[in-house]
Amino acid sequence: MPHSVSPEPSPSATEPREEDGTLPDAPADNVEEQEKPLQRDNPESIVAGFTKEEVKLEDLFNDDDEDEEFPSSSPPGAMVESSPPAAPLQLAPAAKYSDPEVMLAFYQRLFPFRYLFQWLNHSVKPSNDFSHREFAFTLQNDAYLRYQSFPTADLLRKDVLRLNPSRFEIGPVYTANPRDRKTLRKSTAFRPLAKELVFDIDLTDYDEIRTCCDKANICHKCWSFVTMAIKVVDAALRDDFGFDHIMWVYSGRRGAHAWISDKRAREMDDQKRKALAGYLEVIKGGAQSGKKVNVKRPLHPHLARSLNILKDHFKTDILEDQDPWSAPEKTERLLQLLPDKVLNDALRKKWDSAPGRASASKWADIDALAKTGVSHNLDRNALWKAKQDIILEYTYPRLDVEVSKKQIHLLKSPFVIHPGTGRVCVPIDLKRLEKFDPLGVPTVTELLGEIDAWDAESGRNGESEEGKKVQDYEKTSLKPYVEYFKSHVAGILRDEKGVKREREDDDAMEF
């Protein structure tokens, strides 16, 4: 076992983790969070309206860690160069995605280390944005290494090939190199400075309303919940907060993660992150709670826009595909959300006389019976509002907001392999969001087989017809995902270069 693994790992390092979930935060600090009221009417106040508070991390350190591998913290000034390609690994014919040699071949031949570096570094030249960034590795034996850091993409790649982790996570940029944290005289000198704003959508949070699957299982029908959530959250982040560099990444099994790389987003403190997460949180309460949507009227523009996005999905993805009120106990849930007792009794009588009536028909029955005047005291405006709330309850994003609230929260890196499915955690092109197929995302063994098939068919020893070197990912179905990631990173680099130039111009004006 590599010497950087603690000989006596702490219990949290070895106990099994939920495969699709995010990893735990660093130990909580002793500073009480100062609550500030949510200002839904002014999204920009969330980004700009809070004062920066210091985060004390006295309890952040784990003295059982060993950091001898990379004691130096100074980043070199040279451009990043890739490691020379190692000889391709020969895999057994029946190799599975969980086999260590399969993982090693993937990291060696397919993982886009160069673009990952540029994405996290915001420049092609090494800087503290990368060298002070925390990485956390989950090894093949489930040992868990935190506070790993690397001056360059090349050193990250070399350590990944050495340790061959089953996956790795990305944390914040710190004030100092994470490997040097024990040498600092004051623990307050080691604190998070920046991290991408992130959001997590997990289909297990929809188990009470999806009827096709549950737990870790998914199908095309329930994936529509993720599609709806991405549309709503992405629109809010762009239109209400002005963020541009948003990348959605498939989690590898049953969800998606959003990474927002705008400089304003990366530098948000925990209070601002919590407020923004609260701005997007509408569904509240557990599976046994009553009404989960309680919003003020008139509807906030974000909610009005969300309803406009979701109304067609409600008709097809909910009423038709999920058929959420087919069972009697589910029908009672629908009646609980309607405001008029007389109307409810009439609906219950009608539905009891027609067992198996489809949810789309039951939804139409609400207005049909209301128009007959069955309830003389019916408040039609209250009924209309209740129907809006029902649409939101069954379609609005159910976010794991705890993931978004703190800079120190670790999140699975794009392009790692999901340990339960073997699928690559690929970015999702929003221009093709409706066509994204989570069950069609390539597995690691499929990709390695595609490389072998390309080499055998072309007979050109890894070269194109023009004699140019063909990268291994270009020989596989991973290519469009890497190319999308590459274009996303290029947009970040262009903006960051402009910000740097403006800063240099401002400095030049000072006499």
Image (spheres, rainbow, N blue to C red):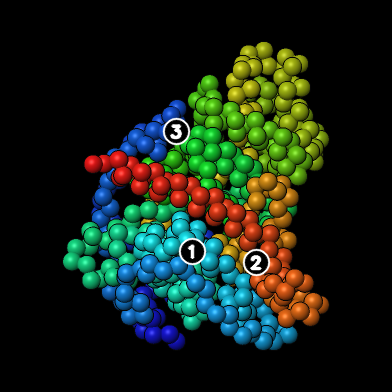
Instruction: Give, as a three-letter code, the residue at label 2.
Output: Arg
Mark identifier at residue 117:
1
Q: Which of the two discs, 2 and 1, labels the residue nearer the N terminus?
A: 1
Mark identifier at residue 268:
none
| Identity of the residue drawn at 67% across and 12% down | 376
Q: Which of the two discs, 1 and 3, labels the residue nearer the N terminus?
A: 3
226 above or below 83? above
Dividing the picture into quadrants, the one containing residue 349 is top right
Mark identifier at residue 43:
3
Location of the C terminus (image quadrant): top left
Q: Give the percent coordinates (x, y) of residue 192.
A: 33, 56
Callout 1: 10 Å neighbours few (<14), some, many (20+)? Answer: many
Q: Is residue 501 left or right of residue 201?
A: left
Q: Is residue 71 left or right of residue 485?
A: left
Is label 1 in a helix, a strand or a loop? helix
Q: CA distance from mark 2 to mark 3?
A: 36 Å
In terms of depth relative to the viewer, which is nearer, 472 or 331?
Answer: 472
| Identity of the residue drawn at 70% across and 38% down | 313
Callout 2: 10 Å neighbours few (<14), some, many (20+)? Answer: many
Instruction: Give, as a three-letter code, the residue at label 1.
Output: Phe
**Residue mark closest to the camera, 2 vs 1:** 1
Q: CA distance from mark 1 to mark 3?
A: 31 Å
The residue pinned by badge 2 equals 423
- The residue lying furthest to the left in this view is 185
